[in-house]
């Protein structure tokens, strides 16, 4: 950004900063000077490099604020200066703005605040020499006294604004709305544009008259015939401004500032300053009142700061009273609160980049001067235990590696077709407007898409025999919900698992029993993961459900619920066979079994509490039961039935196997379970266990429709 040294000095008292001193102070502030240019009139133009988080410095007053703050807190040899804000005059008024103009803001999210004032009886003409000199010094062309003031205010205070000719507004109204598809707009540069329905415009009663936050429209511009002026100052959603500016390839000073954020609380002062100057230069009269539509103004941000923390971060002792003085010079209000806390109220112009304690500490360091902070010859490192989440991820990877899984790292993008196939119910895919992505402009709605692509690559390379590949990945999946202005992007961190259905290594064909085995193997993997993350007593419950997306086979999909000691059961994901549709889409020949789990929930209790038990002193007795059951009965039903009987001396119930065949009949299966009994005080006798077995058999017949297989 170009700033004029003469213009900068207008806001400093005393206003005698030299080019060298301004260069030095702004560089200390983190605003280095890229180039200096001396003009014919002796003024010096400084090209200031302003980072994207310092939108408050995209103005002469913003840079003057930094110069004043650092010259006050700098070395004793530096002349002390204060910031001198421009004082808005009070122009004469007549009539009411509401009698001349109506305003409607249809979306307070896209336009948090829109204000309009009306000036009547204006005489448009050339700007005075002082204004022309200010604008030309920074490379801007003078147009007329009204338009030049809008450009002057943008560069003085960093608040872009715009003027309309009231008589050119159909219906004497302004409406902030999204554009109609294909709606035409001729901008001030004379170019014709076809708008998209995502573009935001300021319209009158008939047509779009301005591209919001980017450029005004030619059909409502102020020219020599204008007598009544509508002055607009607003703030817009930065993403919306950036999107439409890039799509239409329109780069303006206004759009540059709105894309970095303009706080609505700064609008009133800047607007009063602007209309006072317009009235002064055009001889117009200001209509009383302001039309304002938008969301309530945000509350001040208050950040607690610990002086002790600031000293620790900077490595030097800065007294609390000096911290208060340094922050006050930057217009940050500070109130002591307790022995080691300062409550810092962030000014509106810094609301976007000062949000945390460390941000305030950085401001303190800038005030002290980075040259005052010592650089040690050695770096002291305190060795600490890794964070629980990092340890959990390491353990998770170790467990899965031990179970034969290889970790993958895949791209976050997929094709629109595959994205639609794998998107969860109720969630839409997220498209990325980036030509570099070519045919994959969609963010993956599930991590399984990357694993399936990887499995296809392994198949093409014939890297391993069919049935032996197991993959996992820890990554994010993306989606969006809602429509229009209510659209919200959702992001989830997942653990995704993909494994070949086991079987013959010489064939891609798999039987029904093979697929059942694949599901049971994956169930065992989930159990191992649960125990590793939540302790040996954690279990997994599998509940058949409708598939969460078309990537799962309908009849083999189930929800996964985690049961851990000391916490409520929690649904954490899903498991099932990959659908034939997904196999075909990814061109995978071998059936696959997949699972996807919510990673934060899975690792939330790590490390699990260690539980130590004394080894049993007496032998136990194990009994196997083979129950012929309807196909609809699940293992969870059997487990629940046995657990609810409260059998005496029962130590545990485990699954042994399942059999299907002619011997058990159509639509039935034989499930073998093992019941373990033990007495802690003595050796059990078989006749003591017989009544418990009879109770299980009786309840299995009555509640599950079981028959005992002989």
Image (tube, grey):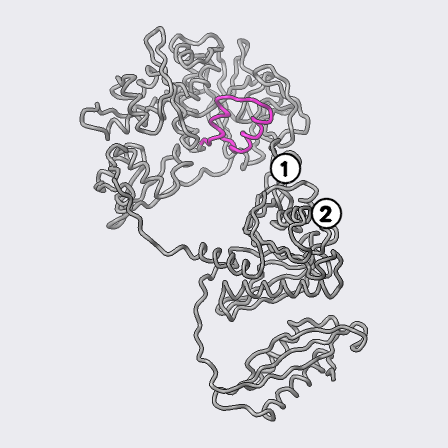
Q: Secondary structure at mark 1?
A: loop
Instruction: Categorize mark 2 by other alpha carbons within 10 Å: few (<14), some (14-19), many (20+).
Output: some
The residue that appears at 58% across and 23% down in the rendered structure is 249
Q: Residue at x 59, y 63 (%)?
A: 525
In the picture of the structure, the residue carrying the numbered disc 1 is 441
Reply above or below: 297 against 455: above
How far across and down, in percent of the image, does residue 510 sit? 74, 60
- Establish if 99 lies above or below 663: above
Q: Residue 543, relative to residue 258: is it above or below?
A: below
- The residue where tag 2 is placed is 587
Viewer-closest of 157 and 115: 157
Q: Residue at x 66, y 36 (%)?
A: 439
Magenta segment, prevailing SS (helix, strand or loop) = helix
Q: Position of residue 486 (x, y in %)?
A: 59, 42
Residue 520 versus residue 430 in the image, above or below: below
Q: Which residues are magenta?
A: 235-262
Residue 545, position in %: x, y?
68, 61
């Amino acid at each position: 950004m170009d700033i004029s040294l003469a213009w900068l000095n207008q806001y400093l008292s005393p206003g005698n900063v030299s080019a060298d001193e301004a260069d030095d102070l702004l560089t200390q502030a983190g605003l280095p000077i890229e180039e200096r240019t001396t003009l014919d009139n002796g003024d010096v133009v400084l090209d200031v490099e302003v980072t994207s988080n310092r939108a408050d410095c995209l103005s002469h007053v913003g840079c003057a604020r930094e110069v004043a703050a650092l010259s006050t807190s700098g070395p004793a040899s530096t002349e002390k200066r204060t910031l001198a804000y421009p004082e808005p005059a009070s122009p004469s008024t007549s009539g009411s703005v509401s009698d001349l103009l109506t305003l409607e803001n249809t979306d307070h999210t896209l336009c948090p605040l829109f204000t309009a004032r009306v000036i009547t009886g204006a005489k448009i003409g050339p700007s005075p020499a002082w204004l022309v000199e200010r604008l030309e010094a920074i490379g801007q062309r003078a147009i007329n006294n009204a338009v030049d003031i809008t450009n002057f205010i943008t560069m003085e205070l960093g608040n872009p604004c715009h003027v309309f000719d009231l008589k050119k507004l159909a219906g004497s109204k302004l409406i902030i709305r999204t554009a109609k598809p294909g709606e035409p707009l001729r901008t001030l540069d004379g170019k014709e544009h076809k708008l998209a329905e995502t573009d935001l415009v300021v319209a009158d009663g008939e047509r779009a008259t301005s591209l919001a936050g980017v450029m005004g429209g030619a059909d409502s511009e102020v020219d020599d015939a204008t007598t009544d002026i509508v002055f607009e100052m607003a703030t817009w959603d930065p993403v919306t401004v950036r999107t439409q500016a890039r799509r239409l390839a329109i780069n303006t000073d206004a759009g540059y500032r709105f894309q970095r954020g303009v706080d609505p609380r700064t609008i009133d002062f800047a607007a009063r300053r602007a209309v006072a100057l317009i009235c002064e230069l055009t001889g117009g009269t200001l209509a009383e009142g302001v039309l304002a539509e938008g969301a309530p103004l945000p509350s001040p941000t208050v950040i607690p700061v610990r002086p002790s923390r600031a000293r620790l971060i900077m490595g030097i002792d800065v007294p609390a009273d000096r911290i208060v003085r340094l922050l006050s010079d930057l217009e940050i209000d500070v109130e002591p609160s307790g022995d080691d806390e300062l409550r810092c109220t962030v000014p509106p112009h810094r609301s976007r980049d000062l949000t945390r304690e460390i941000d305030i500490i950085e401001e303190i360091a800038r005030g002290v001067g980075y040259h005052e902070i010592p650089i040690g010859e050695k770096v002291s490192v305190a060795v600490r235990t890794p964070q629980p989440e990092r340890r959990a991820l390491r353990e998770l990877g170790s467990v899965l590696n031990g179970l034969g899984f290889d970790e993958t790292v895949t791209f976050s993008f997929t094709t629109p077709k595959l994205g639609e196939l794998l998107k969860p119910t109720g969630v839409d895919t997220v498209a990325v407007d980036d030509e570099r992505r070519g045919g994959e402009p969609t963010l993956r709605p599930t991590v399984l898409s990357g694993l399936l692509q990887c499995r296809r690559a392994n198949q093409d390379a014939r890297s391993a025999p069919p049935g032996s590949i197991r993959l996992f990945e820890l990554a994010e999946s993306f989606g969006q919900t809602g429509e229009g202005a209510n659209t919200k992007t959702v992001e989830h961190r997942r653990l995704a698992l993909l494994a070949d259905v086991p079987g013959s290594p010489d064939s891609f064909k798999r039987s029904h029993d093979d697929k059942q085995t694949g599901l049971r193997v994956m169930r065992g993997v989930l159990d191992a993961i649960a125990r590793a993350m939540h302790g040996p007593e954690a279990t997994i419950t599998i509940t058949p459900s409708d598939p969460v997306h078309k990537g799962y086979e309908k009849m083999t999909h189930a929800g996964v619920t985690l049961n851990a000691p000391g916490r409520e059961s929690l649904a954490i994901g899903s498991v099932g066979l990959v659908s034939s549709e997904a196999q075909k889409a990814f061109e995978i020949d071998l059936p696959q079994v997949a699972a996807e789990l919510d990673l934060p929930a899975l690792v939330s209790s790590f490390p699990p509490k260690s539980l130590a038990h004394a080894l049993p002193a007496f032998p136990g007795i194990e009994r196997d039961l083979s129950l012929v059951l309807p196909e609809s009965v699940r293992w969870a039903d059997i487990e629940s039935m046995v657990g609810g009987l409260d059998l005496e001396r029962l130590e545990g119930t485990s699954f042994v196997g399942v059999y299907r065949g002619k011997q058990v009949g159509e639509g039935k299966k034989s499930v073998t379970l093992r019941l373990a009994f033990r007495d802690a005080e003595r050796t059990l006798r078989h006749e003591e266990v017989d009544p418990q077995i009879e109770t299980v058999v009786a309840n299995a017949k009555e509640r599950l429709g079981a028959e005992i297989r002989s």
